[in-house]
Amino acid sequence: MPAKPRRALHPLAQRERVLARLSCNSDFEAATTRLLTQGGDPRIALNAQGRNAYGCTPRPDPALLQLGSSTGSVISHEGFQAAVALFRRLYGASGSYHQELARQRQELSECAGAARCPGTELVFAASGTDLHAIAVHLAAHLTPGRTQAVMVAPSETGSGVPDALAALHFAAHTAQGVQVTRGAPLGAAAMAAPVGVSLRQPDGSLRSQAEVDAEFAQHVARQMHAAGGCLLVLADVSKTGLQAPSAACAAQLRQQYGERLSVLVDACQWRMSADTLQGYLAQDFMVAITGSKFVGGPAFCGALLLPPGVAQRARSVPLTALVDYCARSDWPVGWLPARALAASANVGLLLRWEAALAELRLFTALPAAQVFQRLQTWGQAVQQRLSSDASFAVLPVPPLSRSGEMGWDSVQTIFPFQVFQPSASRPERALTVQELRQLCEQLRQGQGAGAAVRVLLGQPVECGVQADEPMAALRLCCGARMVTEAARLRQPWTLIIEQTMQALDLVAELAKGCGD
């Protein structure tokens, strides 16, 4: 059996080492830029063009029209300056990593709505994939027998999530800077591979909610009967904007099986209000959030919210298997099993969350009615354009189910759509995944006749099969930053809609040349 790679701390993991390296460097912005790309897995590394795997740079790019928050966003000027200010405090004589982390934990809990549910605990992690690995580890120790996860189809979630939910390494190195073998078990043994439930028909149309819920319930029942424990992963929302299973289905299953069933709400898009999130916690559901999708912070800042019941029971769960992924400070103060983890500091993660919190403060300060109205107006304009333009075919997304009064999170903010190439000599055809990736790169570079803007869209996703060929869709998204920037700069909301229509004009134009 090959020896496990020797564990080594990330080069920038300890605050003292970071400051020692920069003791003669007064360029705090350059140092912050470097740190923003540290403390994650290989997806955070920059390519030759200075962009990470999501096409985003660690510096602000105000000329880029950002309509791709379902994938990620380039850090804003406000977010970047907040990160720089935090790094300056850390560099100062009175700077304290742990004090800043405690402040972030408290502020994030309050903004998310978790503080309204006393006893809820928060665990920091680099990415949504890391959060899934942590959640399934806790579930496996909190439920009897062999635990298996039931989730949405892999195409609707992060590419590494199936491995993470099987307790397997999902990348070549971790946020703690440890080299690992992708696909190898995190701990002593891997878990069973998760079961995936398709949310769409093979042609991309929707399955009914009743049918999807019934399949989730069937898989949970089978797992309960066979092994005794299960982790149900509720997507709210998925890559293409879907909820599954329904919250009512998850609540009914939890009532039926009790604590034998753990529930994780995959809210890594974080397109939900504090009221909705609090409602999940009140049902004893774990909730995974990130500040890098709807919120608009830089990629690789995540948090797992543990409701009071789960937090109390999880305090005795050993964390040794997560030593490559977590540091002691990621867990709440006084969490005794965390003593088995390294006493290191992920400064990059701290700075990324600081940037995300800067966006979150601005967004939560806006009146909910104003947010609702703007998101709804934008969504109606996008829906009308995608439905009426022959260059596009919108993928259906059902209304989001929310309890209580209509809030802003009931509005659709992810619009997946196919792109077609018109032709006089042959029937129009839908662009492939590879062609859509090329088109996205052209949009980012500002290509196209008379292109007045550069555009960042959500990365293409596979969404079905048509004529024996995989179907692919782009995603057009509205994020929190679009709303807050318009309010802060006192821009008319019609300008945002006009820019969005210009972006779709460019997509249609560039599609004509694909494959030439």
Image: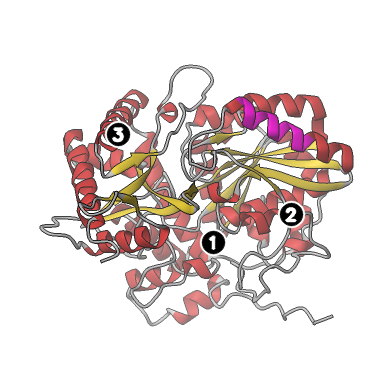
Indicate the amino acid at tag 2. Ala
- Label 1 sits on a secondary structure element that is helix
The residue identified by callout 2 is 193
The residue identified by callout 3 is 387
Indicate the amino acid at tag 3. Ser
Q: Which mark is residue 97?
A: 1
Which region is colored magenta?
A: 210-220
Marks 3 and 1, how far apart in space?
Answer: 50 Å
Q: Nearer the viewer, residue 268 or 214?
A: 214
Q: Nearer the viewer, residue 424 or 492?
A: 424
Marks 2 and 3, how far apart in space?
Answer: 38 Å
Residue in view at x 25 percent, y 52 percent: 507
Is the residue marked by circle 3 packed among few (<14), some (14-19), or many (20+) residues within 10 Å? some
Quadrant of the image for the C terminus? bottom left
Q: Is residue 63 above or below residue 403?
A: below
Prevalent SS, magenta region:
helix
